[in-house]
Image: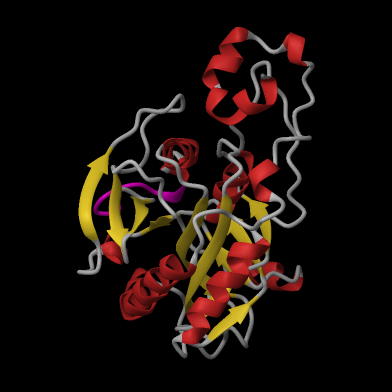
Amino acid sequence: MTDKPVLGVIGGSGLYDFPAIKDVETVYPDTPFGKPSAPIALGKLSGKKVAFLARHGIGHTLMPSEVNYRANIWALKMVGVDRIVSVSAVGSLREDFVPGEIVIPDQLFDFTKKRQYSFFGEGLVTHIQSADPFCVDLSTTLYQTVTAYGASAHMGGTMITIEGPRFSTKAESNTFRAWGMSLIGMTTAPEAFLAREAEICYAVMAHVTDYDVWHVNEEAVSVDMVVNTLHKNTEVAQKTILALVEKLPEDRNCAVCPSALENAMITYKEKISPQAKEKLGLLVDKYLK
């Protein structure tokens, strides 16, 4: 396959075990930041190339804090991905976001503590714009595609990413609600910010699996609850991805993501070390020539 993928999908390995994928091959890119969580599966949906990556490894062997987010995003960039849809399990912090529904969030609050947040540093400094951390164009198309199948979905909402792997205490859950958070998950940060640094459009298909632990009339979140809801929603996710691939044009219409680094690098060009230029060339070469 020489054509670049029209879409990259990050999620569980079971998400893309469906017959519509043709001509599947796997690659395991070696990045400057180590190996990605799993081999990238490249295949074709409706004649268009798509890349899939199991975020937590094949068989879910990596905790949220153990995921090599930098290697994952870099590896997808290496195979030509410029749009990513993340399929994620989340808890609801709002009464109206009901378990079983899908939310396409538009804001992100990073409450993680010990992750690698950037590709940059060590001689090349950038400050990316992240006021709107998700690609508006891709998120809108994703929402339209989800709802076209009659799925119960919401557009908008703020997701908070916690470190994990434990679930929240009631005190934490109620505090997040008081802060105005809508959803809670463990993986969207720093994934979304790294995608922006890599100039990749990024959107989240968030599957609401539970009410976290704040809801007095509902059972507290458990692994069984999360897994059961995800299994029920797998068909919706697969149909959405297939339809999304069919409608996405080869070239992006987004005005923000493809040039996110253009005015973000603050280090003087003559002060950037040869080592930094070589390491980060995939991202910065077009701006340093």
Q: Is residue 3 visible?
A: yes
**Colour mode of the rendering:** secondary structure
| Residue 169 spot, x, y in % from top left | 56, 66
Q: Is residue 270 left or right of residue 244?
A: right
Residue at 34% of width from left, 32% of height from top? 29
Q: Is residue 213 visible?
A: no
**57 in magenta:** no
**Quadrant, the N terminus:** top left
Residue 188, percent from left and from top = 55, 55
Q: Residue at x 77, y 20 (%)?
A: 267
Total number of numbered discs in the rendering: 0
Q: Main secondary structure of the magenta part?
A: loop
Q: Is residue 53 above or below residue 11?
A: above
Q: Nearer the viewer, residue 228 or 267?
A: 267
> Observer-nearest residue: 137 or 46?
46
Left-right relation of 214 to 187: right
Q: Residue 214: which quarter of the image? A: bottom right
Name the residue nearer the viewer: 199 or 169: 199
In the rendered image, residue 83, in percent from the top left (x then y), is placed at 52, 53
Q: Residue at x 76, y 68 (%)?
A: 179
Check the image and report above or below for 265 versus 230. above
Identify the residue shown where x is 69% and y is 69%: 181
Say if 247 sits above or below 232 in the image: above
Q: Position of residue 197 (x, y in %)?
A: 63, 39
- Quadrant (top left, top right, bottom left, bottom right) of the C terminus: top right
Can you say whether 92 is above or below 283 in the image? below
Query: Any magenta on residue 63?
Result: yes
* Residue 182: quadrant of the picture: bottom right
Task: Tell me where the magenta segment starts and ends, as one range.
Answer: 58-64
